Amino acid sequence: MAVILTFFVAHWILSVFFQSFFQHRYAAHRMYTMGPRTEKVLHLLTYLVQGASYLSPRGYAILHREHHAFSDT
Ligand SMILES: [Zn+2]
C-alpha cells in the first residue's frame, strides 16, 4: 500500500513541478533559456512524469497564450 501511495504522490508532485517549470514558465512564457540538450531532457522527463495528461509544450504554449489573451484583459 505504501508503494502505491508513494507512486501517486510522487507522480502528482512531479507533474505539478514539470507543468510549472517546463510547460508554463519555459514553453509558454519563455521566462528563461536553456541549451538544446537540457531542453530535450526536461521534455522527456515531462513526457514520462505526466503520462496520460501530457500535452506537447508547443500545444500547451499555444493554448496558454490564448488563455492569457482573454484572462488578462
Ligand atoms: Zn501563464
Image (cartoon, helix red, strand yellow):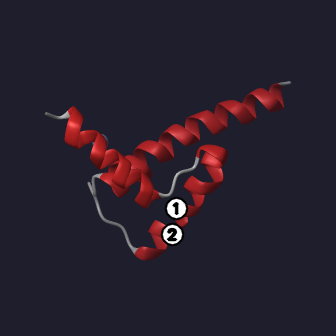
What kind of residue is marked 2?
Lys
User: What kind of element bears circle 2?
Assistant: helix
Left/right placement of residue 25 relative to residue 9 reads left
Determine whether label 2 and label 1 are within 8 Å by CB.
yes
Q: Tell me what residue is drawn at x 23 percent, y 33 percent.
A: 71
Q: Tell me what residue is drawn at x 21 percent, y 43 percent.
A: 69
Splitting the image into 4 quarters, where does residue 31 fall?
A: bottom left
Q: Quadrant of the N terminus?
A: top right
Where in the figure is residue 60, as x and y percent of width and height?
A: 42, 51
Where is 1 relative to 72, above or below?
A: above
What kind of residue is marked 1?
His
Left/right placement of residue 42 relative to residue 72 reads right
Q: Dot 2, how many residues are within 10 Å of its Cα: few (below 14), some (14-19), or many (20+)? A: few
Q: Which residue is mark 2?
A: 40
Q: Which residue is mark 1?
A: 43
Where is 26 relative to 7, above or below?
A: below
Q: Give the CA separation, mark 2 to mark 1.
A: 5 Å
Ligand 1 position by quadrant: top left
